[in-house]
Image: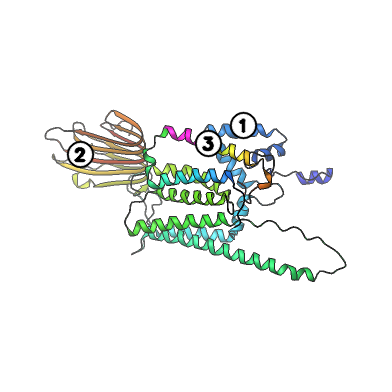
Amino acid sequence: MTRHRADLLSLVAGLAVLGLGLVLLSGGVGDLPLEWVGPVVAIGLGVLIVVAARSNRTPDHAPDDEA
Amino acid sequence: MTSERSERTGAPPRSLRRRTSDRVLGGVAGGLGDYFNIDPLLIRIGFVGLMIFGGAGLVLYVVAWLLIPAEGQEASNIEGFFSRLGLTPRRLAWIGLALLVIVLISNMPVGGPLDGSGSIFIGPLPGMNPGALWALAIIVTGIVLLRRRDAAAAVSAATVSAAPATAIQVPQTRVEVAPVPPRPRSPLALYVCAAVLLSIGLLAVVSQVAELDVRPGQFLGAALTVIGIGLIVGAWWGRARILILLAVLLMPLAVTTSFITAPLEGGIGDHRYVPVTAAEVQDEYRSLAGRAILDLTELQTSPRTIHIAASVAVGQLVVILPEGASIELRSRVGAGDSYVLGSGDNGTSLDNRYIRHHLNRTTYVLDLEVGIGQVFVTNSRVNW
């Protein structure tokens, strides 16, 4: 694997997925109120879409595997 | 028909392809817009609308992204994924057969009659631990993925090293420009997939050996943790954006199963238990999914204390008590509703207690648990 310029979309998505994974792994999701899940997911999706749209403006740095 | 028409008109056949440029996410809406000759914005609005109202938009988009090839490619993402794993249809059939065998020799309920006579179980074989068997299968799959990747890399390297020798044999009478070899794909996604399987398998082994109570949501949490680490690594090395798709697919399942705190025991389907004598009362009533109804109104017994633990991992648990009975009850629901003798509650991590004593009456000490679903405790058989 070769080093490349920072891929912001992968970084943001990775941090979000890592955070959720750690919460689930610790078994603490049961303490989270359900009414917060929808807004948090919506905000997360919005951030990802913005990041994805911004990264698509720089095709020179397109990744090997596109999602 | 499209190609026939194109042959007559001389125009190239129009095929459905995802856009690789001028796109927002995966190029699905753009590709559909090009194919149907409509504004992709309308399709994007449709996807977002379906996403908000029921979530079908996300599923449809992901399915389309998997099945529709990108511009300039013949194979879709799902075909390419299986191809990169070396999984031909024949090999997939063998894997399916192996999984079927594991299910059959595991202590996994495969269904049950609806008359309450219990579930159908197959296995386990004497001395075999089903959990360890699953863990071993997952670990072996992860190792096979790694080995297959290494073998593919070796074949690719051998092909590249052999290429110059072949070029020397080309006759000099004709000059051909060799096509630019495609950029090698990053192996990071495959490594992460293997690491996910290995982590789940190892977690299962540790839980078996140390007798830890690891819930399904925690297994998927481990998987998401590994995927997240892989994505962060891919932000600088290797790249593996396809892992975002894998994470999006896993997230709803992981969050949902994390609320399942009830034991994963029992069968699947609707069950009704109506004990008449004290001897018929079981200490435990377990169900994996479905509706379990425990009707204690027919129970004929002298005043005594009866302890019962009942659980449904996903579904409904209904307990019908005789009028005037003494009750010491604990009701836990991971996510859903809890209705106990007229008072209701809903939400997550519900833990309700109810105590009612009458002199010279049988006391029922009930420990009720539902992972996702409802608990109903009532005195009425109406509706049940």
Tell me where residue B316 appears, x and y as whole percent: 35, 38
Residue annotated with mark 3: B55
Residue annotated with mark 2: B364
Element type at mark 1 = helix
Element type at mark 2 = strand
Disc number for residue B45:
1
Q: Nearer the viewer, mark 3 or mark 2?
A: 3
Examine the structure image and report whether residue A43 is included in the region drawn in magenta: yes
Tell me where residue B306 appears, x and y as whole percent: 19, 42
Element type at mark 3 = loop
Whether residue B1 is visible here, answered yes or no, is no
Segment tinted magenta in the rendering: A35-44
What is the CA distance from the residue labelled 2 to the residue labelled 1?
Answer: 56 Å
User: Left or right: B32 with respect to A27?
Assistant: right
Residue occupying image coordinates x 67% and y 43%? A58
Q: Give the mark nearest the N terminus, 3 or 1.
A: 1
Tell me where residue B348 appears, x and y as whole percent: 36, 36
User: Left or right: B139 with respect to B49?
Assistant: left
Magenta span: chief secondary structure: helix
Chain for disc number 2:
B
